[in-house]
Amino acid sequence: MSECPDCSPRPAGVNRRVFLKTASVAGVATVTAGPSLFAAEAKKVRQPESVVKVLFDTLSDKQKGLICHGWDYTEDARGLLRTRVSNNWHINKHVINSSFYTKEQQHLIREIFEGIIHPDWHAKVDKQLKDDAGGFGEQQNIAIFGKPGDGKFELVMTGRHMTLRCDGNSADHVAFGGPIFYGHAPDFNEEVGHPTNVYWHQALAANKVYAMLDGKQRKTALVERAPREQSVAFKGKDGKFTGIAVSDMSNDQREQVQKTLKTLLAPYRQSDRDEALKCLKTQGGLDKCHLTFYKKNARGQNADIGNNQIWDMWRLEGPSFVWHFRGFPHVHVWVNIAADASVKTNA
């Protein structure tokens, strides 16, 4: 198997404001206030945040000393451990499916995971975890920041192709509790069309926008070389963006961008979807975003697998919105969304 520098492991070391709203959020871009992009979830389940509190209460003092930290815990010069994001890292050495946790605790962690991920995506993400890490819990770790039940808290889950968060909106004005990462490599060097990759359909949705662009628009949207995939810090409202502005698109093109955004958000629970849309609306909606497609990766390698101009690498970006899709040699996706650009990123 080829070695990818970006895939090297990077080991590392209820009284609260719960955001559990399922009310609709005003639409994005030029859509006026109205129904959410998604219908409210019908099934009543125990909220992941409440399960984090239950899990915390089952932990022994020894366990808490090893996986629990203060809200502003800083491990090294890179900044807050809580806000770190990477494509392959372990927030601590304690694997979920190990004797470190009791069976009850393992079940609670799984319940938290299933609460964050939309039910329609449980099997798909399990496939990704099986392909990439031997299955759920085999190579993943968790850490808890803050004290559940007493102010702000957040659970962070990490592993190969995963940085996932459960925070109940404790992180102010930030979607998903902070930057997240997901990916999939059923084959390390994927073939044309990324067969069996559970996330490739997201790229196909974005490429539908490219297919709708005219020649002049395509020249604007297509850029020679991508930035480093980890470069997901916010540029702010005065930032210089590459690609084509969504505001310069026709109505049907903008509608496809909105459909693409809906596709991107689909794997996550309703409250996280809504918070992401709320943050996007605060910064001006999709009309403040740019869509860029890339010929080459940051190292100058051809990133168009099959040379078919179905672009494997692309980026949707606004003042404080980044959704970066890297499809070469396999899928990596970096997501960072906040209501304003003052939020710092630890990538």
Image (cartoon, rainbow, N blue to C red):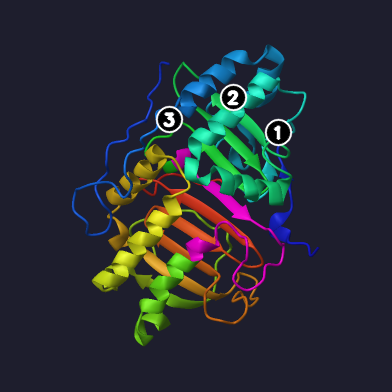
Q: Earlier in the sequence, mark 3 or mark 1?
A: 1
Instruction: Classify mark 1: helix, strand or loop.
Output: loop
Residue 40 at x, y = what percent? 32, 39
* Image-based side of 252 in relation to 271, left or right: left
Q: Residue at x 38, y 46 (%)?
A: 276
Q: Is residue 147 visible?
A: no
Q: Is residue 20 left or right of residue 82?
A: left
Residues packed near mark 1 inside 10 Å, few (<14), some (14 to 19) or many (20 plus): some
Name the kind of residue labelled 3 in the image.
Ser
Mark 3: give few (<14), some (14-19) or many (20+) Cα within 10 Å. some
Q: Determine the CA span between mark 1 and mark 2.
A: 18 Å
| Residue 192 magenta | yes
| SS under mark 3 | loop
Kindly check if marks 3 and 1 are in contact, taking CB atoms under 8 A apart as contact. Answer: no
Q: Position of residue 70 (x, y in %)?
A: 56, 24
Q: What is the quadrant of residue 193 in the picture?
A: bottom right
Residue 170's label in the rendered image is 3
Instruction: Report the disc number at residue 299.
Output: none
Q: Is residue 46 shown left or right of residue 105?
A: left
User: In the figure, 166 relative to 188: above or below?
Assistant: above
Give how far apart the Cα atoms at labels 3 and 2 are: 20 Å
Residue type at numbered disc 2: Leu
x%, y% of residue 197? Answer: 61, 60
Residue plotted at (47% across, 26% down) = 49
Which range of residues does the magenta coloring cover?
176-203
Numbered tag placed on residue 92 in the rendering: 1
Quadrant (top left/top right/bottom left/bottom right) for the N terminus: bottom right
Identify the residue at image location x=28%, y=46%: 36
- What residue did someone put label 2 on? 108
In terms of sequence position, does the residue under pointer 1 or pointer 2 come before the other?
Answer: 1
Q: Residue furthest right?
A: 1
